Image (cartoon, coloured by chain):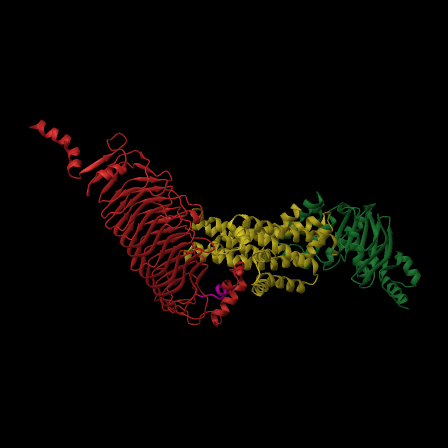
Chain colours: A red, B yellow, C green
Amino acid sequence: MHLKIFSLLLTLPLSLSLLVANGTGVCEKCPIKSIQEAIDQASAGDTIFIQKGIYKESNILVDKPLVIIGEDFPTIDGEDRGEIIRIVSDSVTIDGVFIVNVGTSYTSDHAAIRVVKSSHFVIQNVVLEKLFFGIFIEKSQEGKIYHNKIIGDAQDEYNSGNGIHLWYSKKISISKNTVQNVRDGIYLEFADSITVVGNISRDNLRYGLHFMFSNNDVYNDNVFENNGAGVAVMFSKHISMYNNQFRDNWGTASFGLLLKEINDLEIEHNLFESNTIAISVEGANRVNYLNNEFKSNGWAIKVRGACYTNLFKGNSFLNNSFDVSYNSRINDNLFEGNYWSNYSGYDLDKDGVGDVPYRPVKLFSYIVNRTPEAIVLMRSLFIDIIDFSEKVSPVFTPDELVDKHPLMNVL
Amino acid sequence: MFKILKYSFYDLARSRWSYIYFLFYFILALVLLFLNHDLSKAVITLMNVIIILVPLIGTIFGVMYYYNSREFTELLLAQPIKRKSIFLGQYLGIAISLSLSLLLGIGIPFVIYGLFNSAAIWDFSLLLLTGVFLTFIFVALAFNISIDNENKIKGFGYAVLLWLFMAVIYDGLFLMSLVMFEDYPLDKFSLIGSMLNPIDLSRTLILLKLDISVLMGYTGAVFKQYFGTNVGLFTSLGVLFIWIIVPVRRIVIRAKRKDF
Amino acid sequence: MIEINSLSKKFNKNVVLFDLDLLIEKAGIFAILGPNGSGKTTLIKAILGMVIPDDGEIMVANINIRKSSNYRYNLDYLPQIANFPHNLKVRELIAMIKDLRGETDEEENLIDRFNLYPFLDKKLGNLSGGTKQKVNILLTFMYDSPILILDEPTTGLDPIALIQLKKLILEKKEAGKTILITSHIMSFVEEMTDEIVFLLEGKIHFKGLIQKLKQDTQQKDLEHAIAVLLEKSHV
């Protein structure tokens, strides 16, 4: 009796994997030595286990619903021949593989993993290195891109690709990924109802997140750090962004967040720190900026024009060189109840709200917009004097742009 | 020279004004730190104070000391001492004692506050270094003014005018010329312009620390190199040094030829 | 001792000394006299090296004074207005001069003679004019230099101190020093000095014994003799 149970226990793992997952093993000494072979032989719904080893394969085609799992991170080496895995079937899962050497091309966008016209895919725990494009989702939906690590070695924009690239896709969740040293960390074009959560995108050549013609998307808890140009959100509507961090995006055309031709956006509880421009806005309407923190940026908010009915409330502006910069005298935006570290008013009735309105646009920021080199005069007594006189009677800066109830303390 | 330096320093170290100067900085730094709790903000306010007040106090103090000690200088001139030693000694005496008031006045509150454990220590050290440079520069300029003007009132007038020019008017003219020529590439011009005035130069040095994120937003290659690397830091320090050497040389030359 | 050859000095366009020669070889007390603006102070300052001549040369103890500041070891100078660093104590000032010029033991004796003990630990800024002048005298007389230059030495002194000063000057004369004095007080000059040098408009108009001046001008006292000199020059 005992013996019988013991032998049963011994055979249990093997029989489990055989029975439950109906899996096929791939390894160097197995009967099936290549991944493509395993896929070809498997039937829909099977699981393929790729054991530790190096598989020199490219143009792997997954054309049926399969679960492909790497055990101890097997390496798939594309040997720079082009695309490595293409998924053209619904319900495919790829988990735990290490993919290297995607071929660079000037004519087609080779990717480590490409998903075409499929749904319910899962790509997780994948590590990509030496890539051109990383994960490329094309006309697909309802997928998950979870906990992948994409480490590029991009040098120039023209011959590098994006980390996670979505094109004409919807209802996809992108979470807990790390993307670095590629052209654009995460790129979305015509991608609706996407959630981007808890990703880290840093040291990318161009944008940490690049985002166009995509609506109804949510970003939260992401970190965008030290990217060439920061995060760009363009030609989109109904987006909400919260709890993200935008940091250290330095350079001539660099910003934490670029908003261009955007409507109906919620930006809440984000942190913008040490960016040349924290938020650069052009043609953004009905945007609510609530409870964000702007810290040690060159410009916290640079408005380049045509921005209507925006609300800035409960934000903290801490030690930015310029809090708000406008290039026109027209203002249709409301600043209300923010904390400004440059505020020098008083609060006699002790209600936590300053008794004197704060005027966040300085004359000097207007001068610097016209004559950038004048920046060397920043913080000089003369500039303080002219800023003060502008504050008393505004001539060049929007007259009604004031925070009537500036907070006395950081929120 | 060191003997004269020693006695001028002793004299000033006991002067009421040195203590007032010291106490002013001490209280200012205390108030900034302990009422504010924001180190970066305190550093910014201090920067404004240092860049404006240190030159003012340096010039006024320098001129005042020179005129007040004129008879004593005559006594020294009759002693077997070189003129160069007398004037350099007195100059260094004031510059060092003013610098010490500044360093201790601001330094002590910051040390009490726990500066050594803070990331702001470099910004802060740079701030103090700049303050010391400005003291040496403006005391030297003050000596130049007073050597050239026997008339005390005139000397004071010129000293205040010099300060006003360097602290305010210069920047006004500078800004006007920048705006007037805005169609031309101005990055070299603006950098050179800021070097011709020690107050601007010190300001740039501090901007490098406080506003680097905004400075990096510019396209000019010269700008980029100046602000983006250590070139800016070392050039500024070097030029500040020249700003001390040249006026001090002139003190020595003028002192040799002057009748007392 | 002091040799001045064709000394000229202009301040701006104002000629103060013109082609002045002066030779003082022997020991004794010499008074440099002249009306205001005659160039007395400029002459003294030129000897001290405080005023730099436009032309001519000055030798002190056979050293050309342009060469080095060391000739001033042979000189002691009592300036007209004594103004010292306010925050130094008397004791420290004495120590400082000793530090700058070298050691001497004479100061104890002088402190005693001018009754300066109670003031040694006081700051110079708090002293009265007379006491400052005493300190000033002390600093000048504590060295044993061959030449002394005293610019209005009696300013602000009380009678007792004045007596001490006169004694001091005579002692120095006995010791074979050369002493140059400027003063407006003719009685003091007449009492103390052997020879006078009379300056007018940058030139020396008279140099010699007081006795001789009196004879030349046929006057009984110095004051009148000087007055005659002045009148003559204006004719």
Left or right: residue B126 versus residue A228 is right
Residue C218, percent from left and from top: 92, 63
**Quadrant including the C terminus of chain A:** bottom left
A57 falls in the magenta region: no
Q: Name the one closer to the observer, B203 or A302.
A: A302
The number of numbered discs placed on residues in the rendered structure image is 0
Residue B82, percent from left and from top: 72, 48
| Residue A198 in sight here | no
When asked about the image quadrant of residue C21, the answer is: bottom right
Q: Residue at x 15, y 31 (%)?
A: A11
**Quadrant including the N terminus of chain A:** top left
Q: Name the one closer to the observer, A364 or C53.
A: A364
What secondary structure do most residues of the magenta stretch adopt? helix
A363 falls in the magenta region: yes
Residue B17, percent from left and from top: 57, 57
| Residue B162 in sight here | yes
Left or right: residue C100 versus residue A228 is right
Task: Report the magenta residues as a range.
Answer: A361-366
Residue C8, percent from left and from top: 83, 57
When asked about the image quadrant of residue B42, the answer is: bottom left
Q: Residue at x 63, y 47 (%)?
A: B6
**Residue at the extreme top:** A3
Q: Name the one closer to the observer, A249 or C72.
A: A249
